[in-house]
Image: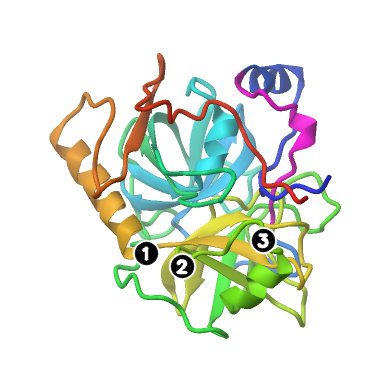
Amino acid sequence: MERFSRIIRFGGPLLQTTLLIVSVWKLAACSEVTIVGGHEVKPHSRPWMVSLQVKNNHICGGTLIRDQWVLTAAHCKGVFGESKKFVEALLGAHSLTSSKNTQRVAIEEYYVPGTYSDRTKEDDIMLIKLKMKVKVNSKAVKVKEVSKSGKDLQVGTQCQVTGWGVVSATGSMPSDTLQVAEVDILDRKLCDCFYNRNPVITQDMLCASNNKRQADACKGDSGGPLECKKAFVGLVSGGLGCGNPKKPGVYTRFSKRHLDWIHKIIKHQSNTTNVGILAVATRHLWISFRESGCLCCISMCQTRFLCWTSL
């Protein structure tokens, strides 16, 4: 059965054992996402890019939006598990095998919407608070502001997706160097048709592909940024296969609701150092995950990694 998420799973016995402990699903059942049909970026031309890693293995992409905050996809949380002991954010990297200009920072906290659904793919967004502020400099590490417009994108808008994901649909290892691909925004109704409304592409989602070059995000690109006209408007959520124009990439769009959530989480954390469950945004619960376990409200905890699946 083909899978929908775009995360990379690999590593030695210790990593594999650790991931199996935190996941009900077998790791072999889930495949994830990287850039196909793209090209290597100029080194440090995307200084906000973050490689989220488990025991030095790249798992998901992310974006530095504040000096202590990273924005990524909620489904990446399933790989990381409840314990943050082995999870780190690598910043300032172009090559994953080079430590030049890089900063490696541990994770303090995850924030995932209680409304996130693996079934519907709604609210596939996660905030990560780092244990310390990173050193923002003029070359390798910079902050990328989330677009504040919240406006929808027109069909045909040209965008770019960036990541260290695999560079072929059959690949299993991440790209050593940061890659970028050009994609175009698709009509939601057409995308719904391609996916047979599984999932339903809502107003909080975007679909994008490149028919000419078959460019797409792929395994390992989950959580990475979607930029349109240099504005950070969304992040990689999933898709079936890589580079297939009839199964385009699906992205979380930063709607006004998501922008309000990001603002409230960060603002609240600036004023307190000990928070469990946050109730922010009208009629929506947003859950904080702690080292000791998952603090739940109305049984909304998601403690296992779930993959997007086709019928």
Front residue (pair 75, 92)? 75
Which element carries disc 1, helix, strand or loop?
Answer: loop
Decide: is 276 above or below 229: above
Secondary structure mostly seen in magenta is loop
Q: Earlier in the sequence, mark 3 or mark 1?
A: 3
* Residue where numbered disc 2 is placed: 203
Residue at the extreme top of the image, as rendered: 292
Amino acid on which disc 1 is placed: Ser
Task: For mark 2, give the secondary structure.
Answer: loop
> Does the rendering let one see residue 92?
no
> In the picture shown, does residue 161 fall above or below 159?
above
What stretch of residues is rendered in magenta? 22-34
Counting residues from the start of the chain, the first of labels 3 and 2 encountered is: 2
Q: Is residue 8 left or right of residue 76?
A: right
Residue kind at label 3, given as amino acid type: Ala
Q: Which residue is mark 3?
A: 217
